[in-house]
Amino acid sequence: MLKLSWKNLVNKPLNMALSLILFALGVGLISLLLNLNHQIEERFNKNLAGVDLVLGAKGSPLQMILCAMYHVDNPTGNIPVEKAKAFLNPKHPLLKQAVPLSLGDSYRNYRIVGTTYDILQLYNASLAEGNLWANPMEATVGADVAEALHLHIGDTFKSSHGLVEGIEEHEHDFKVVGILKPAGSVIDQLILTPSESIWESHAHAESADGEVRTDSSAVDRQQGGHPDEERIGTDSASAAVHEGHDHNHDHGDHVHTKVAPTKYDSLTISQLAEQQRLELMAQTDKDITAILVRFRSRTNIQALNMGRNINENTDLMAASPPIEIARLQTNLGLGADVLKALAWVIVVVSGLSIFISLYSSLRDRRYELALMRVMGGSRGTLFQLIITEGLLLAAMGYVLGILLSHLGMAILAGFMKNTYRYSFSGTQFLPEEGWLLLGALAVGFVAALIPALQARRTDISETLANG
Amino acid sequence: MLTTSNLQYSYDGKSSLRFPDIQCGKGEHWLLLGQSGCGKTTLLHLLGGLLTPGQGSVVVGDTAINSLTTSELDKFRGKKIGIIFQTPHFVRSLKVGENLALAQQLAGITPNPQHIATLLGRLGLGHKINAKTDALSQGERQRAAIARALVNKPEVILADEPTSALDDHNTSEVIRLLVETAKEVDATLLVVTHDGRLKEKFAKQIML
């Protein structure tokens, strides 16, 4: 019976192709949207990394989150260490973790992040080869960066200002000292370095210019927006490192170069990170861009009110990533919903086309159907035959649609990786796609129902007599 | 083998058609002659269970076919009655051989490719087994229709004007094959026609 249905369909290849293409388009579009939505959400959620609050300069909270967590937007501005240092203190009663970020530069569209080892723990990252960054202008790069830019240990590169390639290169060379293992999160796409590197290249740029720059870019509020700009200009980075040493280290001697850690267990890393933070806290005349924090306890009332307190009582801005991202997704989701509705319209129209093609083929095949009754087929047989044809079309349309959408995802993945540095997968399948199959079969069934009932009712004697 | 009694049929409850009682024995070949419009096709449909009579009964073998349910009747017809129509039609998406296999399958019999090939060979269509039915000539189509009617070795074969669209040569060929193959399966054959060319070929005749 299946074979006969199939042959009947193939016998009218154009009708079949039309129904099939329409159906595949509808199914493909729905599946594509489901997959996109799912994978974007997954990406966003993975990169949330348990961060409870992002602290930064006042501005758009969403922009700050996109900048500090996803590294796709420019900073809202910078904050003086003086004002931020309370949150960097390892002894802060509410905070389990605080990751300072100094942003503003990039290399070939990959962002350079001045930070402490805290970021490794935040994203569960570990070294693949080489060392962690220890001194200014040393960089440890994420797995994707290393792969995309063919960076190896010992390579040097010049950073450029902002997130886009080609805008005024800084003169200082960064040196790659290590490469991270792929972590499956945004850290794969970052170039990690001490905050001093950022200060140093900016200080250098300034002294080279000989005057305070008046860049309008948000990043440059570091220099332009704060009264302590001159100190940045005059302090040399090595002096800054010095100060840090004096304050926190008891080495006694004033070595300028620090040694990269030799052990990478989480205890060592967190101790080193703590030290780095304490050093950073001492640089009260410098700026950082943002701090990512995790609460010790998410049920603590004080912790929950912390964001609002910061926003109301300080010059800083605090924003909760889950809330901002949920808001973003609601807004994006609206567009996705409209598209999804459109896709369902296509599916319904394709159902209609299946209906019309079955119905019109029925007229040509009345005699055949009557003949099948003569040959011993029952009314049920004819009903089954037409329903099978509808279901077969729907199932084939579904398979074609799913193939299309996953092919689309794979193509999109390549495109997205280049432009947004977010990768998608074309081989991931969702449980929703199982439901989509049921939906598709239901459409096929409904479309075939009336023609099938018609076939069932065929008056064989009359049809044969007039045939 | 095939008997009717007091058979009546009316379209839309208007003028009703009355048919003479028929009694055909097993393996007998009958010719039913009548002018156009006198209800030949109606009678054939009544005999084949394609129509339900207003009155009277049709008995095939020892089954009163109007006592069967619709789907029982469909199965019974598929197995026991082979029908050949004026214009031969086929399931066009299937090849000649596949049409015969479908006839077996729909009757609830496992298709037997060897039997199908032999039968088509017997009717001079061995080389057309994998041809599309649209590609057959008029004579070939009618012979293929005979093959389909015979494929399940029915007890009764009903032929409705099987030769009206054929030339003299094809007519005698088709009738010869029809009679021969019916004999081979020992089936009762009833040919309904107004075609005078057939008169001399059948001894047993009924006038309508």
Image (cartoon, rainbow, N blue to C red):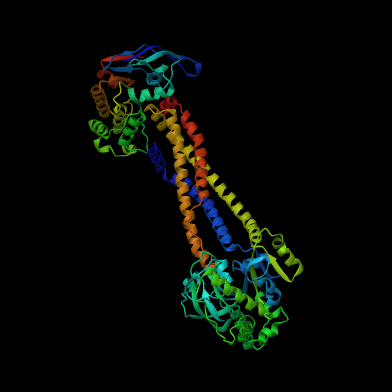
Q: Residue at x 37, y 27 (%)?
A: A376
Give coordinates of residue B62: x percent, y percent: 34, 15
Q: Residue A103: tell me if it is visible.
A: no
Residue furthest toward the right? A313
- Give the camera-side residue of B85 and A15: A15
Give coordinates of residue A395: x percent, y percent: 46, 44
Query: So how many labels did they put on this image?
Result: 0
Whether A141 is drawn above or below B164: the answer is below
Which quadrant: the N terminus of chain A? top left
- B119 horizontally vs A341: left or right: left
Q: Residue at x 40, y 32 (%)?
A: A368
- A354 horizontally vs A371: left or right: right
- Give the camera-side residue of B173 and A372: A372
Whether A461 is drawn above or below A396: the answer is above
- B192 horizontally vs A289: left or right: left
Which quadrant: the C terminus of chain A? top left
Give coordinates of residue B172: x percent, y percent: 25, 26
- A171 horizontally vs A304: left or right: left
Locate residue B183: give its quadrant: top left
- Give the camera-side residue of A426 and B103: A426
Whether B127 is drawn above or below B157: the answer is below
Q: Residue A319: tell me if it is visible.
A: yes
Give coordinates of residue A317: x percent, y percent: 71, 68
Locate residue A365: give its quadrant: top left
